Amino acid sequence: MFDWGAATFFFCMSLVLVVSGVLAYRGKYVMWLALKSFFPGWAGLAGLYLGLAFLGLSIFMVLHGLDLLHGPIMTLVGLVCVVAAFAGLPIGIIGFFWLPRFMLPKWVKEDEEKMARGEDKLSQDLRPGGKLYGRLGRPAGNAPHRRVDGGGKQIE
């Protein structure tokens, strides 16, 4: 007996992951960057590979359940689905923790280079004269230092 529920679930989940992964690679969907505080890798980009794995698995489940894997062409289609599932799954899981530089999109590489040079928005705000200078644990160089006596009064 073929389980249509599992195949439908994997197919729908794979479509969501593939679409969000493609949008993440293109720089159109960047809300996944909020996950960088939970995962050291690239969760949004890893979604593409997980989506491809689930897509291959769901297509293979349907082909196998309907007993259509006969003949050389359908066997090749089934083999491609299995290879996509077994290649995409480990890449997707590892992607939550690390992706090699060649797998990162151009916009991520450019942002990393800007951060290394100190040209990103946060680095500009933390520099002397920036709106965050002297905050976040860094003492401001030009700010007057408060000296207080034992009673809590400020000494000039």
Image: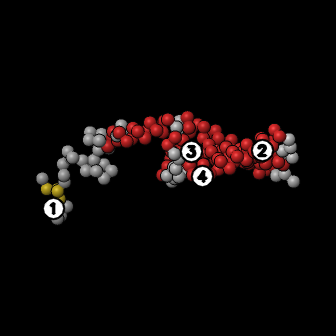
| Alpha carbon distance from label 2 to label 4 | 23 Å
At which x and y percent is residue 6? 77, 51
The residue drawn where x is 17% and y is 59% is 148
Residue labelled with disc 4:
93
Direction from residue 56 to residue 41 in the image, left or right:
left
| Alpha carbon distance from label 3 to label 1 | 53 Å
The residue drawn where x is 58% and y is 37% is 23
Amino acid type, callout 2? Gly
- Residue depth check, mark 1 versus mark 4: number of the one nearer the observer: 4
Sequence order check: which comes first, mark 3 or mark 1? 3
Sequence order check: which comes first, mark 2 or mark 3? 3
Say whether marks 3 and 1 touch (CB < 8 Å). no
Q: Could you classify mark 3 by the number of other residues whose Cα lies within 10 Å: few (under 14), some (14-19), or many (20 or more)?
A: many
Residue labelled with disc 3:
44
Residue labelled with disc 2:
78
Q: How is the image coloured?
A: secondary structure
Say whether marks 2 and 4 touch (CB < 8 Å). no
Residue 124 picture quarter:
top left
